[in-house]
């Protein structure tokens, strides 16, 4: 059943392309893609304006991404507002999201404190007994 579902979408798109209609490349689809890209660029620029390069002392691939491998894609999508495809690439370590998403993604890390990005790195909002703070990063002990 899952195999049928997984192939249904690409097969339907291939059929539409063969018929001369390519849904992701219509004028309306391109307009929506452009609008989403413009909003994302604005949100990234606004985040950069409000945060200095010193605000974030993390390595995403080391500090957050490994734990996301256990997170459902729906949780990553809900936390960031990013697409299923991009969320999948993030979870697999093939893409690094903009830093404005890191605090929300860090909160998805199972078994860790809820985290907030602050000047100087991550600080725990709630520090369970199995979490220790080291170099202003929350790590499992």
Image (cartoon, rainbow, N blue to C red):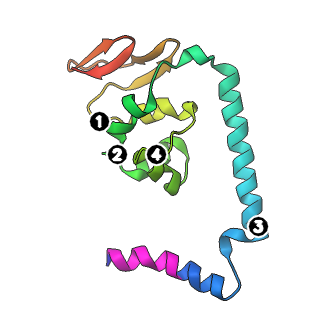
Mark 2: which secondary structure? loop
Asked whether, in this view, residue 52 is left or right of residue 65, the answer is right
Majority secondary structure of magenta residues: helix
Q: Which of marks 1 and 2 precedes in the sequence?
A: 2
- Per the model, the C-alpha gap separating discs 2 and 1 is 8 Å
- Specify the farthest residue to the front: 94
Depth check, front residue: 18 or 49: 18
For label 4, the crowd category at 10 Å Cα-Cα, with few meaning under 14, some 14 to 19 and many 20 or more, is: many
Depth check, front residue: 138 or 92: 92
Q: Which of marks 1 and 4 precedes in the sequence?
A: 4
Percent across and percent down for residue 5 are: 40, 76
- Per the model, the C-alpha gap separating discs 4 and 2 is 11 Å
Above or below, comparing residue 13 to residue 88 in the picture? below
Residue 24, located in which quarter of the rendered image? bottom right
Residue denoted by label 2: 71
> Is residue 8 covered in magenta?
yes
- Per the model, the C-alpha gap separating discs 1 and 3 is 40 Å
Q: Residue at x 77, y 60 (%)?
A: 31
Residue denoted by label 4: 90
Asked whether, in this view, residue 63 is left or right of residue 51, the answer is left
Would you say the residues marked 2 and 1 are in contact, meaning their CB atoms lie under 8 Å apart? yes
Mark 1: which secondary structure? loop
Instruction: Read off the magenta span.
Output: 2-11
Q: Which of marks 2 and 4 precedes in the sequence?
A: 2
For label 2, the crowd category at 10 Å Cα-Cα, with few meaning under 14, some 14 to 19 and many 20 or more, is: some
Q: Of circles 3 and 4, which is in front? A: 4
Q: Which mark is residue 28?
A: 3
Q: Which of marks 2 and 3 precedes in the sequence?
A: 3
- Per the model, the C-alpha gap separating discs 3 and 4 is 27 Å
Q: Which mark is residue 110?
A: 1
């Amino acid at each position: 059943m899952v195999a049928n579902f997984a192939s249904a979408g690409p097969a339907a798109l291939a059929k539409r392309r063969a018929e001369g209609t390519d849904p992701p490349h219509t004028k309306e689809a391109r307009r929506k893609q452009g609008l989403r890209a413009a909003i994302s660029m604005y949100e990234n620029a606004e985040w950069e304006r409000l945060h200095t390069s010193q605000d974030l002392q993390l390595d995403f691939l080391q500090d957050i991404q490994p734990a996301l491998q256990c997170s459902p894609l729906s949780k990553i999508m809900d936390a960031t507002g990013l697409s299923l495809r991009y969320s999948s690439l993030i979870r697999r370590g093939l893409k690094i999201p903009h830093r404005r998403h890191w605090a929300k993604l860090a909160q998805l890390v199972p078994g860790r404190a809820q985290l907030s990005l602050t000047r100087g790195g991550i600080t725990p909002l709630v520090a369970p007994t199995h979490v220790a703070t080291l170099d202003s990063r929350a790590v499992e002990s």
